[in-house]
Image (cartoon, helix red, strand yellow):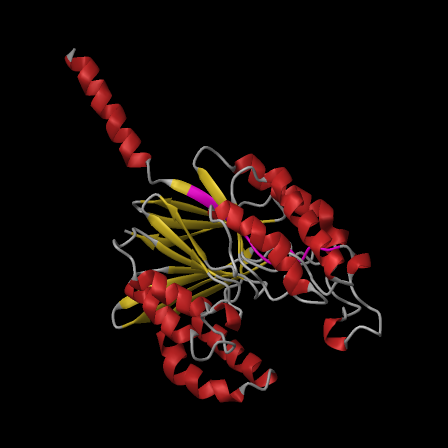
Amino acid sequence: MIKKSFLFFVCLYAALAFADEYNFYMISDPHFGAAETYATDPKIPRRYRTKKNIHRADKVMPHFKNLFADIQKKSDSKTRFIIEAGDLVEGGTHNEATHKKVLTDAIDFMKQYFKFPIYMVKGNHDAFGMGGENAWKAVALKEAARYANVDKLDFANYTVKCGKDLFIFMDFYPKAKGFEFVRKTIANLKEKPRYLFVILHCPMIFTYQFLNDALPLCELLAEHNGILLAGHSHHNTVAKFEKNGKSMRQVTVSTFIQPWPMRRLRIADSGISTEQAKQMFVKKVKLKKEDRFLPVFEKKWAPFVTEYRDFSGAGYARFDVSDKGIRVSFQSVDTAQKPLTVQLLSR
């Protein structure tokens, strides 16, 4: 009887110990869409037309199939969901009907491989083009609402709980008021989550696109030791922002596969130091003629970015979450290559 009771409590302890141990996957920027769907007609406004040398996802479909099959194979009983952090499709299609079809095809393609929830945020390409905004709302936003278990979403602003952790998904388009949504959600928390994640398309560390909102968001996340997940940059990066003894982490993931063989397919430590990354960003700002941002960057950003690692290549990321911390593994689309693993957070 004693042995049975002891065995029961051992099993109970084990169940409780692993209840909040799980993993999830993340992809971003696949830019799906067959070449024939893109708008090239001179009658269409220039801003909606596709460049001749633009990425063609249809040319690299075998790589995507291999990559998604690898996620399918490596997912297990502890896999909870996958995050698609924007630019699921290339956009710039002929019309709204075509855009809807491209989105539907892309989502159906993911569903073939992922039997767990697919949480999406909107990227700049997802709603780009003739009728793109309406198409995104009709197809992708409807799908996001279903996975988020809500009746309707007007924008890609929603929350998902996973055990003791909170995931805040944010629409970065100005009219969506995503920054306000994040601030209100955190302010109204009744209890502090074990881990707090914010997911949006554009990274906040080293950005000049959200001059008035990016820094306050990083400072807010630092108060909660939070993690920001993003895409957009077509780079796999890990960054750390520290201020007043508190810190937040940012991870960006790239699933952007170029249409020519073995280009941007391998993930390897680039060896770029934090200082080199800052210098490269300054050059980028000048190239983009965003000089107004330099004083802000040099005084308010650069001193507080204490870690920045950049990994070239395309693929996916797997996050392993437990009471001990969070580990992220970058897997190249060259799935024979060993993943590159970084300890993101330790407790």
Which residue occupies the extreme top position in the image? 1
- Residue 254's image quarter? bottom right
Residue 43 is left or right of residue 114, and the answer is right
Instruction: Tell me if I can see residue 83 in this picture.
Output: no
Instruction: Tell me if I can see residue 275 in this picture.
Output: yes
Query: Does 122 appear above or below 347?
Result: below
> Quarter of the image containing the N terminus?
top left
Give the image location of residue 339, x and y in percent: 52, 47
Is residue 146 in the magenta section?
no
Which residue occupies the extreme left position in the image? 2
Give the image location of residue 17, x and y in percent: 28, 35
The front one of 345 and 204 is 204
- Residue 92's image quarter? bottom right
Query: At x 51% / y 56%, what residue is drawn?
Result: 153
Query: At x 54% / y 51%, what residue is drawn?
Result: 144
Specify start and end residues of the magenta stretch as a single range.
Answer: 23-33
Give the image location of residue 81, x and y in percent: 49, 43
The front one of 61 and 121 is 121
Give the image location of residue 277, x and y in percent: 49, 73
The front one of 277 and 258 is 258
Is residue 28 in the magenta section?
yes
Which residue occupies the extreme right position in the image? 42
The front one of 10 and 110 is 110
Query: At x 77% / y 71%, what residue is drawn?
Result: 49
Q: Say how many tags the image has.
A: 0
